[in-house]
Image (cartoon, rainbow, N blue to C red):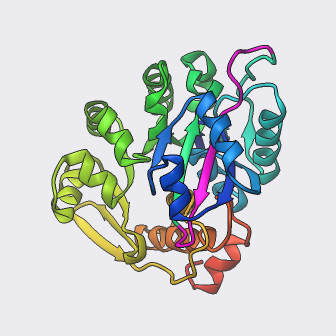
């Protein structure tokens, strides 16, 4: 038995969550509903404009790993933070969930700081993310421990990491070590604009290395540059063994082995949509790693996504296994 069922690699971030209306977004020049990369100056300016805020450890893959760990999975995370206050918050929160976290810290005198994402949540629950990557942008292949990747049944790669200058080399090292030891690779596309920036690299990795692709409707349409959702799903299923694609309130679609399943969403009041896709992936992977069939994995993903959008922040607050039992999936 391998030490880890899942190891995630992503941008280690602390989310700074604040509420505002659409008028604030327009005034502050924030595009609604997407992730925008910003520099430190812009991060400071936006922070000064928002009202009361809450700091919660985040990062897309880290959220997935936190959900997987809360479910009792054997898991670890790789992502760069600085030896500073936010870096300490990030590491503590992730380890408290039960995940291993051993990525070397950037030194306290490093020019960049721990990354943070200013998440502005509007009354409709939509989140507009403004991301200062900081030191996490500079995760390199030297931060990838081949022994850890080889000791993982699955690795989970965050699409946002494609924006880092050395991220492709880091991913390649992780993939080679994992697959060389019989492990499997999952990838999340993260954001349609991220796909636009790195479409060729995504397509190549999916065809050559990925065993399970996570996406949402907008991301998969962007990946294949088509307007028809079913066409995009069919193209994805031809490129990789398994596809799990979410479609907001319409639930999720799972494709594998020439079959396709639709999993309905779990109705809930949307408080903050941050982390819905992250928790879907974490719960889906937990189900897969623990021998559940693909429709059940999709159901678990939808339950976890429903839980996380019912409150502020992208980490689960309820007992996910209890929710799975309540819905009859375990």
Q: Residue at left 45%, top 78%? A: 265
Most frequent secondary structure within the magenta stretch: loop
Q: Is residue 283 left or right of residue 223?
A: right
Task: Report x, y in % for residue 269.
Answer: 57, 81
> Is residue 183 visible in the rendered structure shown here?
no
Q: Residue at left 66%, top 34%? A: 115
Task: Report x, y in % for residue 260.
Answer: 27, 69
Is residue 279 inside the magenta stretch? Answer: no
Front one among 58 and 111: 111
Is residue 115 inside the magenta stretch? Answer: yes
> Is residue 34 visible in the rendered structure shown here?
yes
Q: Is residue 61 above or below residue 79?
A: below
* Number of numbered markers: 0
Q: Is residue 253 above or below residue 233?
A: below
Task: Report x, y in % for residue 145.
Answer: 62, 23
Magenta span covers which residues?
A: 109-125
Residue 137, picture quadrant: top right
Q: Is residue 256 left or right of residue 231?
A: right
State the quadrant of the C terminus: bottom right
Front one among 114 and 238: 114
Q: Is residue 270 above or below residue 137?
A: below
State the quadrant of the N terminus: top right
Q: Residue at left 58%, top 85%? A: 327
Task: Report x, y in % for residue 280.
Answer: 52, 62
Residue 196, picture quadrant: top left
């Amino acid at each position: 038995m391998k030490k880890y069922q899942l190891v995630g690699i992503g941008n280690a971030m602390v989310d700074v969550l604040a509420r505002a209306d659409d008028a604030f977004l327009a005034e502050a020049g924030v595009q609604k509903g997407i992730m925008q990369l910003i520099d430190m100056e812009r991060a400071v300016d936006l922070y000064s404009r928002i009202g009361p805020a809450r700091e919660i450890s985040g990062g897309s893959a880290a959220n997935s790993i936190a959900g997987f760990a809360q479910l009792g999975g054997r898991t670890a995370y790789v992502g760069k933070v600085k030896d500073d206050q936010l870096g300490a918050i990030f590491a503590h929160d992730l380890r408290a969930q039960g995940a291993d976290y051993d990525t070397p810290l950037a030194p306290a005198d490093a020019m960049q700081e721990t990354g943070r994402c200013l998440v502005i949540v509007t009354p409709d629950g939509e989140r507009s993310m403004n991301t200062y990557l900081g030191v996490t942008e500079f995760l390199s292949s030297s931060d990838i421990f081949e022994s850890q990747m080889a000791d993982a049944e699955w690795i989970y790669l965050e699409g946002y990491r494609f924006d880092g200058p050395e991220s492709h080399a880091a991913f390649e090292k992780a993939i080679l070590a994992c697959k060389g030891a019989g492990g499997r690779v999952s990838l999340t596309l993260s954001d349609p604009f991220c796909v636009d920036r790195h479409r060729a690299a995504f397509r190549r990795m999916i065809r050559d290395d990925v065993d399970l692709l996570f996406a949402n409707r907008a991301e998969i349409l962007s990946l294949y540059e088509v307007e028809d959702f079913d066409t995009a799903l069919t193209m994805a299923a031809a490129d990789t063994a398994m596809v799990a694609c979410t479609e907001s309130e319409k639930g999720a679609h799972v494709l594998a082995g020439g079959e396709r399943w639709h999993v309905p969403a779990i109705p809930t009041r949307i408080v903050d949509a941050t982390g819905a896709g992250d928790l879907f992936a974490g719960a889906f992977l937990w189900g897969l790693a623990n021998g559940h069939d693909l429709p059940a994995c999709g159901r678990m993903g939808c339950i976890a996504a429903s839980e996380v959008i019912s409150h502020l922040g992208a980490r689960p607050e309820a007992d996910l296994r209890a929710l799975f039992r309540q819905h009859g999936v375990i």
